[in-house]
Amino acid sequence: MSTLLYEHNQTAYEAALSMLRETGRAAVIHPTGTGKSFIAFRLCEEHPDAAVCWLSPSEYIFQTQRKNWVKAGGAVPENIFFLTYAKLTGIAGQELEGIRPDYIVLDEFHRCGARLWGQGVQRLLRAYPDAKMLGLTATNIRYLDNQRDMADELFDGNVASSVTLGEAVMRGILQAPKYVLSLYSLQEDMERLAERVRRAENRAVRDAAEKYMEALRRALEKADGLNVIFERHMPDRTGKYIVFCSNAAHMRQMMALAAEWFGGIDKNPHIYSVYASEPEAAHAFSAFAADEDREHLKLLYCIDALNEGIHLDDISGVILLRPTVSPIVFKQQIGRALSAGKKKNVVIFDIVLNINNLYSIGALEEEMQTAAAYYRSLGESDAIVQEHFAVIDEVRDCRILFEKLGEVLTASWSVMYGQAKRYYMENGDLDVPARFVTEDGYSLGHWIYNQRYIRKGVLDGGLTEEQTKMLDAIGMRWELLADRSWARHFAAAQRYYMENGDLNVPAKYKTADGIGLGQWLCTLRTWEKAGAHPKYLTFERKAQLDKIGMIWDKADRLWERNYRAACAYYEAHGNLDVPGNYADADGIRLGAWIGRMRARRAPALTEEQILRLDAIGMIWKKRTDQSWERGFAAAEAYARTFKNLLVPVSYVSEDGVKLGAWIQRQRKACKKQTLSSERMMRRNAIGMVWDTHSWMRRFVLVKQYCREHGTADVPQNVVAEGCWVGKWLAQQRRLRAEGKLTGEQMELLSSLENFSRAV
């Protein structure tokens, strides 16, 4: 019996199967902890005769996933050929030729964007272009690599299922964590703030800033240390916690503070450490995983070895000691503590290095809100399990004072204008990144952002005509960055449409001036399906795209292309009896597509699509079913003519059906018990002889010999269709003499010409 999948994974698996049949490629983008590797194992389980090449960043990740599959009740798949991406890059051509995969699984497929690993994958795909490819990852975006979308690059945008971390928490797939915010290093922040206060030109501004600065110092002095915070919020004082550090030196520094930070919980915690490139990493992690001591706290310090692919069910929480991370790493690290089906709530300690990095968790909250809004728009509010989770801000007072101090220091418009003018002189424009902070500590990006929104009337504030002219003089662009992005990309889309007549833009396509048009259009499709970013993808903008041939669903467009090819085949041949391996002059694999349409008829095809196929003679029965029906019709005709179905193996009917071979296949299927009861009944009704060694079969062979030779004197060395009919006839003579034949058998033998005389 197949291992049960969680509902969200079962839905994703069915969608992936459908997409694999349709396009040969399917990506599943689910957060860490949701069990997405089980989708690939189910594919192996349900296709035991298919060869599966499974690629992963490390063998350890794969072995851990396999153990989890077995733990869940699954059998160890025997049809997997496993390779790491690194191993694939150096594999010899002869070994590559021996893989011959029917399916390729790309685990953590965002990693295929790396140059060497990507080259190895492309080499495999070129060698086996017909292999179906399933991809798994928690995120398809490479944030630090020009935000490349690997779902587009590898899977042409064929995403079978996409669930964000926020959606998974909102739907209750993952338990909402308790999120504790704190920090442990403010020295650089305080020095930079003090310098800004000293340099404030306005006396009133400087005096107000100094008051807030002093209040901030007092608040920090009163703030609890990390030892108190850990002791207060650790739910499981003998549990397992993963501690993420930024590099090896940082990890050693943090491990040295373990006694100070965790001494109030356990004076002798069990401490483990794992480096990504450390040979003993597997041993250390295994020891941590196996540690069931009920009296001591367990801490696993690591760098990036556990960011992806590794998961334990009994993790009580994670501790993020990070100067800064990309969104992908941040979510992966959070995901180490979350897993589908976990009953207890875990704790996330976000211990940031400086106060400017306090807001990473906002991305998760925003994802939850977006997902909830989307489900409400579908009328599926019942799917919303939780829209918020507990965020405990242990530095709230400090953060509020920091914000007020920043407001005071940036209150002088002239000071910020001076910073903007300096940026313009150095860079030639005012395209300031939103989070840009000057060397003096001024949040110039935020200020420029506010000026645009003040002028647009979105934010309260005064902006005089003179100030507007001053900003114009140093290259200020008043349109919002999102609006400028839209205008630039839409213009590129218009040009593409004018040159090509459509918007069927390849996912990797970039314009001559570097605009990633293919990626932009794929992103818009994703947002449209999810109902995300309605302020950017407005109704008016969607109408603009529709006018130049926007393809919102590539799967529908692909169906229309194949349908046109089917119409052409029907016009040329008068039917849709398309051979399975048939491809037309344009390379469209029409035979395979027709087969998929038969398999997907309901519920995947719409009523309109079914009617359109019927109009051009669609044969809904599978080719195997059609072949069986032709064989059965020939068998019926033979039975009417010869009054039996003892068909010689070499017999071919007048219309070319190899009936003898067909009868043999039916007997083999009967032995293997693969025949349906309906077909068994139909064949029995026309006199099918299942036992090829039966008395009646031998009698028919003797009768055929008698007809051909005009005598029942059959030499004992005569063999017909594997049966020694001469010896069998001699045996019947002996049995007759011994009185061991039935009356019916005697009557049949007596009917043979010269039989009585022969005996």
Image (cartoon, rainbow, N blue to C red):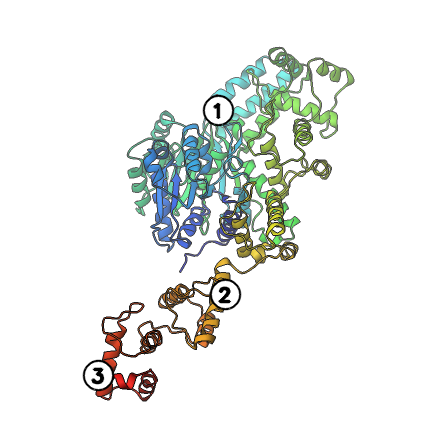
Relative to residue 653, is residue 698 depicted above or below? below
Circle 1 residue: 186
Percent across and percent down for residue 67 are: 34, 48
Left or right: where 114 falls relative to 439 = left
Q: Is residue 289 visible?
A: yes
> Crowdedness of circle 1 by 10 Å Cα count: few (<14), some, many (20+)?
some
Q: Secondary structure at mark 3?
A: helix
Circle nearer the viewer, 1 or 2? 2
Rounded to the nearest angstrom, the CA distance separating label 3 from label 2 is 43 Å
In this orientation, which residue lies closer to the viewer: 291 or 698? 698
Name the N-terminal-most of marks 3 and 1. Answer: 1
Percent across and percent down for residue 281 are: 31, 35
Relative to residue 675, is residue 53 depicted above or below? above
Name the mark on residue 629: 2
> Crowdedness of circle 3 by 10 Å Cα count: few (<14), some, many (20+)?
few
Circle 3 residue: 734
Amino acid carrying mark 3 in the image: Arg
Which residue is at a point 41% across and 44% down the rendered structure image?
Answer: 316
